[in-house]
């Protein structure tokens, strides 16, 4: 609710007041009798004071308020949720893992979960991907070592921020260097093409996915498509027409893809590996460009070409990396430019 643009808030206010809607294509309005349940992660009273949320809508919605308790205060939920995610990801990635060791359960209960259920979901995904047996052990729950240290958190955040400033792959400034470069070359080094950065990040993700001996690699192609759609929707504050324009898509196509991603999110399968975080700022840069062509298709083709280079005729591995069926993968290969 806190993300709604002001013009949409005005329309919602009318509905809340009048209980009246105008169906698309209809010549008459309809009266409806509904209950409204709204959710937000913002303090709407502060948003009203800042002029970002309509006060009249806020007071009409604020009848009964329920605060969402953080996961660290709901310790009875941690293990059931962890087991639920474990079973889902074991099926999704065809892993033999079935349960947690007693030590792993204690580690899950002892952690404070600053990222709540979303962090728990990602932690279990990472553990499932790394697991080579039926039991998850504490050493596979890497969040314990990574996030309990304040310095580690700072290092991770700094590394993510650096992606915005330099291309992945090692381009860095060289103080006290006697090498002279042109202003154009210097500018390109400081602010490289976002598509080039995406290529470098995707190459790194493919390498990491193929380094392990897991039976089924993570579906990078599916993640890339989903995150492009979500990033465009967030950048446009939920305005479908603007989000579709940022991706170079028809609005109907964008709405269909967003609905599909939302279904995946609601099913609890929108988890990512820890290393995937470096791609998010690059995706945001691409979304901010004045794109005239289909961004999703361009990104998919870029990844597909890199996957083909690395997997050659291992079509089942390539299909798994793209997150599609084998027939679909073969068809995509046939349509690649020669």
Image (cartoon, grey):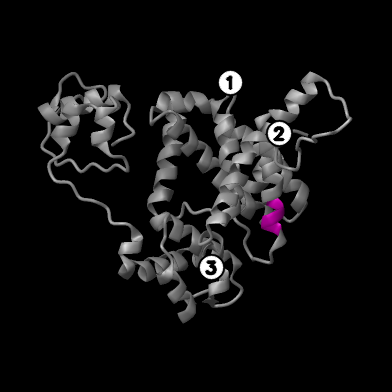
Left or right side of 225 for 236: left
Mark 1 vs mark 3: in front: 3
Left or right side of 282 for 230: left
Of the pair 280 and 16, the residue shown nearer to us? 280
Q: Quadrant of the N terminus?
A: top left
Q: Is residue 280 visible?
A: yes
What's the CA distance linking mark 1 and mark 3?
43 Å
Mark 1 vs mark 2: in front: 2
Q: Quadrant of the C terminus?
A: top right
The structure residue drawn at horizontal position 56% and vertical position 65%, both measured from the top left corner, is 145
Q: Position of residue 149 (x, y in %)?
A: 53, 60
- Secondary structure of the residue carrying tag 2 is helix
The structure residue drawn at horizontal position 41% and vertical position 49%, both measured from the top left corner, is 265
The structure residue drawn at horizontal position 46% and vertical position 67%, both measured from the top left corner, is 86
Residue neighbourhood size for the residue with mark 3, other residues' Cα within 10 Å, grouped as few (<14), some (14–19), many (≥20): many
Whether tag 2 and tag 3 are in contact, CB under 8 A, the answer is no
Circle number at residue 292 = 1
What's the CA distance linking mark 1 and mark 2?
18 Å
- When asked about the image quadrant of residue 49, the answer is top left
The residue furthest right is 178
| Magenta segment, prevailing SS (helix, strand or loop) | helix
Q: Position of residue 218 (x, y in %)?
A: 60, 56
Considering only order in the chain, which callout, 3 or 2, is on the residue closer to the N terminus?
3
Magenta span: 206-210
Q: Which residue is mark 3?
A: 141
Residue neighbourhood size for the residue with mark 2, other residues' Cα within 10 Å, grouped as few (<14), some (14–19), many (≥20): few
Circle number at residue 196 = 2
């Amino acid at each position: 609710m806190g993300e709604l643009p002001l013009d949409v808030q005005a329309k919602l206010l009318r509905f809340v007041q009048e209980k009246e809607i105008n169906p698309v294509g209809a010549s008459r309005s309809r009266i409806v009798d509904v209950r409204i349940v709204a959710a937000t992660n913002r303090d709407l009273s502060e948003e009203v004071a800042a002029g970002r949320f309509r006060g009249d809508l806020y007071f009409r919605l604020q009848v009964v308020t329920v605060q969402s308790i953080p996961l660290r205060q709901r310790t009875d939920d941690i293990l059931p949720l962890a087991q639920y995610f474990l079973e889902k990801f074991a099926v999704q990635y065809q892993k033999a893992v079935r349960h947690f060791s007693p030590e792993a359960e204690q580690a899950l209960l002892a952690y404070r979960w600053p990222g709540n259920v979303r962090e728990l979901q990602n932690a279990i995904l990472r553990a499932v991907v790394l697991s080579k047996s039926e039991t998850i052990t504490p050493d596979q729950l890497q969040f314990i070592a990574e996030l309990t240290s304040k310095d580690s958190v700072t290092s991770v955040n700094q590394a993510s921020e650096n992606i915005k400033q330099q291309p992945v792959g090692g381009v860095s400034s060289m103080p006290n260097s006697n090498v002279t470069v042109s202003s154009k070359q210097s500018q390109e080094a400081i602010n490289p093409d976002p598509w080039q950065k995406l290529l470098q990040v995707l190459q790194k993700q493919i390498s990491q996915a193929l380094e392990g001996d897991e039976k089924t690699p993570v579906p990078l192609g599916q993640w890339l498509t989903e995150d492009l759609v979500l990033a465009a929707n967030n950048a446009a504050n939920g305005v479908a027409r603007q989000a579709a324009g940022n991706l170079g898509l028809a609005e109907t196509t964008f709405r269909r893809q967003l609905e599909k991603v939302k279904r995946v999110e609601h099913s609890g399968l929108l988890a990512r590996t820890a290393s995937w975080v470096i791609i998010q700022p690059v995706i945001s840069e691409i979304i901010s460009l004045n794109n005239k062509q289909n961004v999703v298709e361009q990104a998919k083709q870029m990844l597909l070409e890199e996957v083909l280079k690395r997997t050659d005729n291992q079509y089942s591995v390539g299909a798994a990396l793209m997150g599609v069926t084998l027939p679909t993968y073969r068809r995509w290969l046939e349509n690649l430019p020669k």
